[in-house]
Amino acid sequence: MITSIEFRALYEGDPRIVFATLAVPVFNSHDAPMSIRNITGLDPAPATVNSRPIGSLDGEFYVDSHLGKRNVVVTFGINPNPGPQAVDDVRTNLYQYLSPKSFVSVRVISDNRPPREVRGYVETVQNDRFSKDPQVTVSIVCPKPNFRSINEITLTGELNGDWVNFVMGGQQVVGFTLFMPLALSSRIGPDERIFIETGTYIAAFSDKKYELEHVLMPGDSNLEMNSNRGEKFIQYSFGNSFGNGINEHSLLDNMTPESLWPYLVPGTNRVRLRTPDTPSYDDTWTLKYFEAFAAS
């Protein structure tokens, strides 16, 4: 059961930076200056299903479908007797966390499962100023509709090592980030291949291969990939923030036409990296991902 909701004001340039956190209980409390009276938009986001007629045949032909944005609408009840804080003070304090255009996370706290959160932008803040039972209604639009775990999960493995097997506990297909620093002696190239492979025991999601060809990476550089939707890239980088700075080189042109961007599915997954032309490399790679959920 949901016990409280946390609202976090985030820095859009780096959501890891939290300006302020407001925790509000779901049930009315005489001790709390406010509580949540109602919240909508926590169920699975609606899908848009596109289809077209098929001549004189009954029915239509399925074309495609996608999830739309999520709209979370929260109604706050303000305690009319909050002690030293007047109703107007409580309302003004709420604006510090939730004001139009601000980038926020909505974190759902439950007593029977780990917290889940979704991020979005405050659309409207409306209140009843002259009501005997004061309340404020806030609308938050979330362009990415899925909730996700608040803790990023980290896996490690060795280049040219065995498959790394693990269970992904979310409900949705997700991408991941991958980082592998090469030792100074582990120069790759000038004409080598790198395979990033994922797989599962479900036949429909059997082993998938992402292949880079004609790769040249200097020793003491970093292989970096992001396979999350809307954020995809693959590159290598070297240097540091001092001296001449960090140099980044995209590897998208090295991607073979038949390659598929790797992803993880709910249930059992496996991942490995290999360089078949030089299998002696044994550098360590790190993979990170968040579990995703259709609802809170």
Image (cartoon, rainbow, N blue to C red):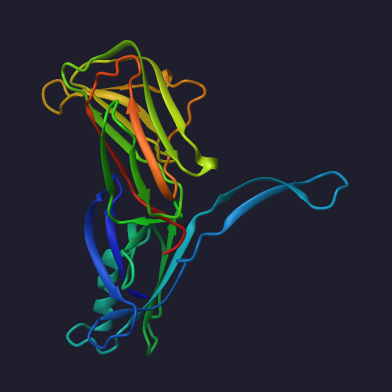
Say which of 83 and 222 sits in front: 222
The correct choice, above or below, for 228 with respect to 187 in the image is below
Q: Quadrant of residue 32?
A: bottom left
Q: Percent from the top left, x then y, of residue 120?
A: 39, 56
Q: Percent from the top left, x then y, of residue 106?
A: 35, 62
Q: For the C terminus, which image quadrant?
A: bottom left
Q: Quadrant of residue 249?
A: top left
Farthest residue to the left: give it: 243
Q: Residue at x 38, y 54 (%)?
A: 169
Farthest residue to the top: give it: 190
Say which of 68 and 174 sits in front: 174
Q: Residue at x 31, y 73 (%)?
A: 111
Q: Percent from the top left, x then y, of residue 83?
A: 19, 88
Say which of 88 and 103 sits in front: 103
User: Is 185 placed left or right of 8 in the picture?
Assistant: left
Say which of 281 and 264 sits in front: 281
Q: Percent from the top left, x then y, of residue 269?
A: 40, 43
Q: For the N terminus, which image quadrant?
A: bottom left
Q: How many marks?
A: 0
